[in-house]
Image (cartoon, rainbow, N blue to C red):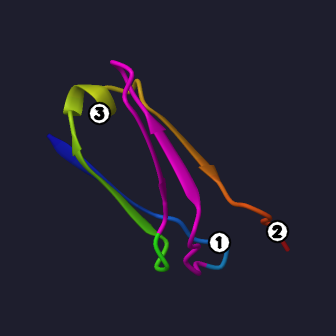
Amino acid sequence: MCKMLLQITDDKGAPLSAVLLSLSGEKQYRSNNLTHEDGIMIFIGLVSIETCSGNTGLNACVKSFVPD
């Protein structure tokens, strides 16, 4: 088992909350979660072969985000 800790920030380093993170891996693994107010999301209990083998996809989506 392993975990993945991510912190999502803007280009100035400020944390971004409510970012939808979609993690997918082998064996039909899927997880969709929103970042917390501090921009952090932790995926816990991942089977290492699914997420650490290089066959993992991570997408981020921010609703109504307009970059400066």
Examine the structure image and report whether residue 29 is included in the region drawn in magenta. yes
> Looking at numbered disc 2 in the image, what kind of residue is underneath it?
Pro
Badge 1 or badge 3: first in the primary sequence: 1
Q: Residue at x 39, y 28 (%)?
A: 25
Q: How many marks?
A: 3
Give the amino acid type for the residue marked by disc 3 in the picture.
Cys
Residue, disc 2: 67
Q: Residue sitting at 73 percent across and 61 percent down? A: 63
| Residue 68 in the image, given as x and y percentages of width and height | 85, 74
Which corner quadrant of the image does residue 67 belong to?
A: bottom right
Residue 37 lies, in percent from the top left, at: 49, 79
Residue at position x 58%, y 78% in the image: 13
The residue that mark 3 highlights is: 52
Residue where numbered disc 1 is placed: 10
3 inside magenta stretch: no
- Real-space CA distance between mark 1 and mark 3, rounded to the nearest whole angstrom: 26 Å
Q: Which residues are magenta?
A: 13-35
* Secondary structure beneath label 1: loop
